[in-house]
Amino acid sequence: MTETKQQYGDPMTYPIWEAAARYELLIQHCKVCGHYQFYPRPFCLNCDSDQLEWKRVSGDATVYSKTTVHLKIAPEFDPPYVVALVELDEGPRMLCNIEGGAAEIGDRVKLAWREREDAPPLPIWMPA
Amino acid sequence: MNDWEKNPVYIVGAAETALGAVPDQTTYSMFSLAAHEALDEAGLNVKDVDGIFTNYMGEEGTVQVGEYLGILAPRYVDSTDIGGAAYEAHVHHAMMAIANGRCEVAIVGYASRQRSERARSMTMRQSELTLTAQFESPYGLPMPIGHYAMIAARHMHEYGTTSEQLAEIAVAARQWAQLNPKAWKRDPMTAEDVLASRVICDPLRRLDCCLITDGGGVIVLTNKERARDANKKPIRVLGAGESHTRWNISQGPSLTTTAAKVSGEQAFGMAGVTPADVDFVQPYDSFTITVLTALEDLGFCEKGEGGAFVSGGRLAPGGDLPAMTSGGGLSYNHPGALGVLLLIETVRQLRGEAGERQLADPKIGVAHGVGGLLSTAATVVMTND
Ligand SMILES: [Zn+2]
């Protein structure tokens, strides 16, 4: 009996979420100019090439901006919590939560994962 | 010579809808009453309208507004959605359309009952897995304030901007509101009050945020010939511009430089004036940081100097650059999309009919809309000369 597993994401992001299930962070890398980009696209934002490949990255990053949310916006969120924009060492920025300690703008942070019931693990960051 | 120089375009009518809390109207009835009032000022009739420009008036908004008003065969229609900045962009588009003879009498407007309907959603949950749903919504960034908070935090980090400086903006708006009988919030407020208000998304506090009210408005634009019918002084549109940056906050090179950079360059370039020529400005004050970044990007001060620039009451009554003279979204009214009300206040100041808050003989005013997640901007330069 074959089990059909529903893919999470969209046709451009399936590989990201498949990798997330293995706790690996993938971002796109341009084979022509070396540019890294997030989110994925079928072309390079820097040089327009279509020669893109997936690269696993460490997730080592620096906090670019952050806010502590004191507002209850939905049942699944328990304020206060920190939402941050982190800049990966490869260049792209990702929105995230920072957990497991405080981090200010400019501080180094490292990748962690949050388990979810109905979706693959979610990348979050914590103080390095 | 460009079309808009050969065929100048004028705002000949401007009217607010009912404001504040409007329990006894619908958005369409509000819009239609404001349209009739604005057209009366213009010495025109609904039957003269052949151009409709609106945003946030339901699906295919120009169709629904046109039908309600009985305008069933317009020649030029535009529902460009760039959030609260749409109406300044609509003036840009209407200006081009009228200058090129594609329509003669255009209405630009909007009405909302978001306060009465409590319709404003703070989350950005999506029914399908958009990029935002996959990569931003799971982190619980409140919409839109969380985005503006991250921009403010980054501005503070890059340029040393302080919460005290942001508070000056809110205080200036309140001082103007105290001179406007239509303002929702008129009680005295100090910078200390702003700083003592509850932190919502740091560094932004409750009093850094705009109001949530019902309201809206309509303006009427036409060509020089039809402007002769106007019952009030026609206000000439000198220039306009628009642009946008990103939607997802992870995208784009800078958090602190906004679409005002392009919209301002375009509008001032078209108008043939510089920020130094401007007597007053109506920057979209959804949040205090929105005003600060706009003043920098429009060129009223250098990038990073906004904090010092707004200090010492520069934007307040009696200051060097009067701004938010209605009391703005922070203290007058904020019906979801403030853009049209910024245009109306600019017209009123240039006509000299702003009552207690009237500026002394202003010649050039600027309305600057901002929308989305500080994603969009559109700028209109006007004169009474
Ligand atoms: Zn490339």
Image (spheres, rainbow, N blue to C red):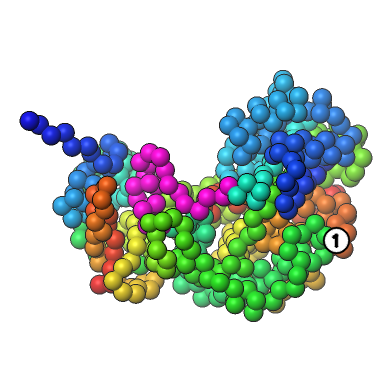
- Residue B151 seen: no
Q: Residue A2 location in percent, x, y?
A: 9, 31
Question: Magenta segment, which residues?
Answer: B119-140
Residue at the extreme left of the image, as rendered: A1
Residue in view at x 49 percent, y 49 percent = B245
Q: Residue A39 location in percent, x, y?
A: 33, 47
Tell me: residue B108, above or below residue B315.
above
Give the residue pinned by disc 1.
Answer: B358
> Main structural element of the magenta stretch: helix, strand or loop?
loop
Amino acid carrying label 1: it is Gln
Q: Residue B239 location in percent, x, y?
A: 71, 45
Tell me: residue B141, above or below residue A53.
below
Q: Which chain's residue wears label 1?
A: B
Residue in view at x 90 percent, y 43 percent = B232
Residue in view at x 30 percent, y 50 percent = A37
Task: Check disc 1: other Cα within 10 Å, few if <14, some if 14-19, many if 20+.
Answer: some
Q: Give the SS element for disc 1.
A: loop
- Residue A122 seen: yes
Residue in view at x 72 percent, y 21 percent = B72
- From the viewer's side, name the closer residue of B141 and B84: B141
Per the image, is B131 magenta?
yes
Per the image, is B256 magenta?
no
Q: Residue A34 location in percent, x, y?
A: 25, 51
